[in-house]
Image: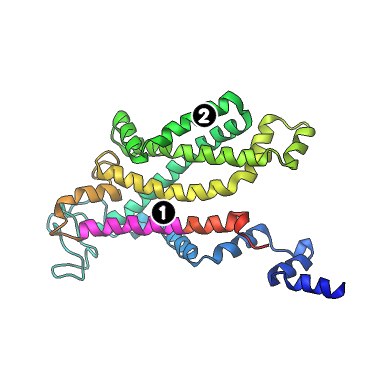
Amino acid sequence: MASTDATTDSSLPEGSKRDSMLPDRLRPSPFKEFWGYFCENRGAIVGLFVFVAFILIALFADVLAPHSATEQYRDALLQPPAWQDGGSTRFLLGTDAVGRDMLSRLIYGARYSFFIGVIVVVISAGTGVLIGLLAGFARGWVDTLIMRLMDVLLAFPSLLLALVMVAILGPSLINAMIAIGIVLQPHYVRLTRAAVMQELPKDYVTSARVVGASRLRLMFVTVLPNCLAPIIVQAALSFSTAILDAAALGFLGLGAQPPTPEWGTMLADAREFVLRAWWVVTFPGLAILINVLAINLMGDGLRDALDPKLKRS
């Protein structure tokens, strides 16, 4: 028997053996456990650092930007970056067609992109989670009606549906954010409903019902906290989707309007100068690429850290 027990213990991972032998007060906290899994994904760490830098640039744009985002320097139209012939250290990344500093506009553009991502996630996640909870708890015809409506919204290409909504509401940054938030809402509804249906048969929900918990308490206090992991991951991915869709709408002239320094609008303004002033197109495109890639990498790390199926026991 002793040899059998020794064999069983040796087959366990070293970390699991150590954790199982520790008393509860010495075991790692949930946050430390989450951070340990998150740090195993190097791409997620890089994405997190880039995302934090993106947030800091957005928050301190007034301090970091060397010039105003809308001030025009008529003596420096389409001036190249500082390292190119004809460039100047006054404008490190050059200027656009009307003499505005590219670096300053990119820095202020980070603020607009961050604002877009936050508002869209709040709109889509807030309403989507509520509707998903309602569908998961109500069941019957209410559930069927909600899910068929979500299926109809998902049947349309997301950008096309956002275009239609912005065309109805009118071209502006606020209307673009509302449209993108509505387009992304069905993903939260389906995700929340699936998570709720998975949690409802469990013993802790039955116990809460037995002791007389109200429907609202069951929804928001008992069940919802146990459904947050996939919702958090979806929110991170929706943040990058919001930046991309807002840039697309801005490029088409239906999002932020000039002279707003939004990256998609900057690309739209620079279309005619692609061949003779590469910097006015390249830098806004790189800003979108780097930030969306960083957020997606961070979301991948969140999925690995929060999904219990991917954790080692």
| Side of 214 relative to 192 (left or right) | right
Q: Can you say whether 14 is above or below 66 in the image?
A: below
Q: Secondary structure at mark 2?
A: helix
Residue at mark 1: 59
Q: Quadrant of the C terminus?
A: bottom right
Q: Residue at x 41, y 50 (%)?
A: 240
Residue 280 lies in magenta, yes or no? yes
Q: Nearer the viewer, residue 192 or 1?
A: 1
Residue at mark 2: 146
Q: Quadrant of the N terminus?
A: bottom right
Q: Secondary structure at mark 1?
A: helix
Estimate how packed mark 1 is, as few (under 14), some (14 to 19) or many (20 or more) residues with alpha carbons within 10 Å.
Answer: some
Q: Which residues are magenta?
A: 279-297
| Side of 92 relative to 158 (left or right) | left
- Residue type beneath disc 1: Leu
Label count reads 2
Give whichever of discs 2 and 1 has the lower sequence position: 1
**Whole-percent x, y for residue 196 in the image:** 62, 39
Q: Residue at x 72, y 42 (%)?
A: 202
**Whole-percent x, y for residue 160 in the image:** 32, 37
**Whole-percent x, y for residue 294 in the image:** 42, 59
